[in-house]
Amino acid sequence: MSDKATHPADAPLYPIREVSRLTGVNSVTLRAWERRYALICPQRTPKGHRLYARDDIQRIESILQWLNRGVPVSQVRELLDQPRTVDAPEPAAGDWPSQRQQLIAAVESLDLTRLDTLYNQCMALYPVSTCLSELFKPVVEALEEHWDDQLGAALQRRTLEAFLRTRIGTRLYHANLSSQGTTVLINRLPDDHGTLWDLLVALAASQAGYRVQLFDAQLPLNELPLAVERLRAGALLLCSGQSERADLIRRQLPRLADQLEVPVGLCGPIARIRASDLADSQIAVLGDDPLQAMTRLAPLLRA
């Protein structure tokens, strides 16, 4: 793949930071794909720094395509070496479903060690977008389905929130230091029971290249215009896993959007539940999928 015989001496080579920028795959994941699964084999400088050729980058893009189609990372190598006409096999039985069940079990049993192992394993081997779509979002949805009347639900929720706040918060801090993107302010709406949807949306926004401003507690609606101004935010995203009060949806949020000169977007299950109520307002209904919400946000910022 990346040996000297394959690449001419004058072929351009890229450092790992540039490859990460081009492909959207962080350097930790690139190293894991190389060390654990031999999916890529970059050249090395005399000091041991990795250098990637153009066909390495194309191979990384092929890896992403297989992963996004549900193929486990452990099965990707054999597919890469087959003709391009080979169809993706069905995801291995027990792979993503198994990982979801393991994560749910870790939350329900308050097993922080197992929770940490599963989180780190997923984030090291898969792109953030895949972790969000295949693991974190489905797990949060599954847990919230039976948390309403379950004894111990509050304890489970707060445990998962505290865990994700620490892990995702660390990623946001380091990503914000290097990001040149638009600042996005994310705020939880009043009736939501916790911060899970805020955190998922924040992770998706950071992955999309935005600088993310996220508070542990929700800001009052009347302080959001000041927050947007002082933090120089280019967009305000409002999140909730609940339907929220009718007065908030039909009067207060549209009034808030009229006060601001930046896009105001609605994310999380509320966007699915209340879409029809906001059809004629300035509120942008971005959807309950954090990744899709970022795709829908981009043209609003360009406008």
Image: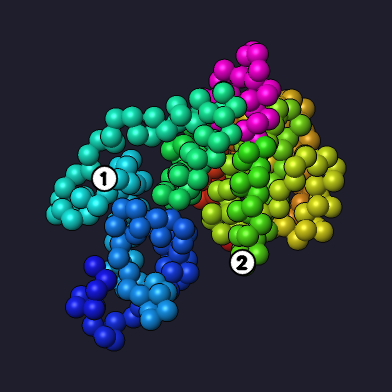
Looking at the picture, tell me which residue is in the foreground, 35 or 211. 35
Residue at the image position 57 percent from the left and 23 percent from the top: 108
Image quarter of residue 162? top right
> Residue 209: image x %, image y %?
56, 59
Residue at the image position 61 percent from the left and 19 percent from the top: 147
Identify the secondary structure beneath mark 2: helix
Label at residue 291? none
Height in image: 167 above or below 162? below
Q: Badge 2 is on which residue?
A: 178
What secondary structure is the stretch in magenta mostly built from? helix
Image quarter of residue 249? top right
Residue at the image position 75 percent from the left and 46 percent from the top: 215
Height in image: 228 above or below 135? below
Which residue type does callout 1 highlight?
Answer: Gln
Looking at the picture, tell me which residue is in the foreground, 236 or 11. 11
Which residue type does callout 2 highlight?
Answer: Ser
Looking at the picture, tell me which residue is in the foreground, 29 or 238. 29
> Residue 265: image x %, image y %?
64, 44
Q: Nearer the viewer, mark 1 or mark 2?
A: 1
- Is-magenta flag for residue 148? yes
> Residue 292: image x %, image y %?
50, 44
Q: Badge 1 is on which residue?
A: 75
The stretch in magenta equals 140-161
Left or right: 232 in relation to 202: right
Identify the secondary structure beneath mark 1: helix
How many residues crowd around disc 1 within 10 Å: few (fewer than 14), some, or many (20 or more)? some
* Residue sitting at the far bottom: 10
Height in image: 262 above or below 46? above
- Give the spatial CA distance, label 1 vs label 2: 34 Å
